């Protein structure tokens, strides 16, 4: 995601988006607050992985999903859904429960 977004919003923009996503996840889901508090550096994905490994599997998966979903939603509000989808096409896979747009016929 970082490689796809840096040319558009810059390195500092990517870091800000990541940090804002972390903050929103922690404030929306109190059980994630301790995970957020344990992340000290601006965007250290190794540190994030280390913190997630310390969680039980369901909490780590929940936090990861919430973080990615929040980041995607924030990016959509900044640059729009079409550009977000195009930029993240190679890294963001829609949920298996979502129906592709061409299959949404009445």
Image: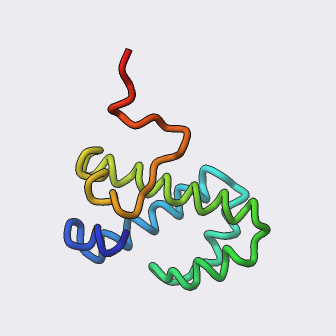
Kindly identify the residue that appears in the image at 23 percent across and 67 percent down.
9
94 with respect to 88 (left or right): right
**Closest to the observer: 40 or 2?**
2
Q: Position of residue 66 (x, y in %)?
A: 57, 55
How is the rendered protein coloured?
A: rainbow
Residue 36: quarter of image? bottom right
Residue 34: quarter of image? bottom right
Label count reads: 0
Q: Quadrant of the N terminus?
A: bottom left
Q: Is residue 7 above or below residue 70?
A: below
Residue lying furthest top in this view?
106
Residue lying furthest right in this view?
56
Kindly identify the residue that appears in the image at 58 percent across and 77 percent down.
48
Kindly identify the residue that appears in the image at 65 percent across and 82 percent down.
50
Kindly identify the residue that appears in the image at 31 percent across and 51 percent down.
85
Residue lying furthest left in this view?
7
**Closest to the observer: 60 or 98?**
98
Q: Is residue 43 above or below residue 91?
A: below
Q: Position of residue 84 (x, y in %)?
A: 29, 53
Q: Quadrant of the C terminus?
A: top left
**Closest to the observer: 76 or 26?**
76
Q: Position of residue 100 (x, y in %)?
A: 40, 37
Q: Position of residue 31 (x, y in %)?
A: 73, 58
């Amino acid at each position: 995601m970082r490689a796809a977004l840096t040319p558009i919003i810059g390195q500092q923009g990517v870091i800000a988006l990541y940090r804002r996503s972390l903050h929103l996840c922690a404030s929306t889901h109190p059980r994630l607050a301790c995970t957020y508090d344990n992340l000290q550096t601006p965007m250290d994905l190794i540190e994030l992985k280390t913190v997630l490994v310390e969680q039980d599997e369901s909490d780590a998966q929940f936090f990861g999903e919430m973080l990615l979903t929040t980041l995607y939603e924030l990016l959509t509000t900044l640059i729009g859904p079409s550009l977000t989808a195009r930029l993240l096409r190679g890294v963001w896979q829609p949920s298996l429960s979502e129906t592709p747009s061409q299959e949404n016929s009445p």
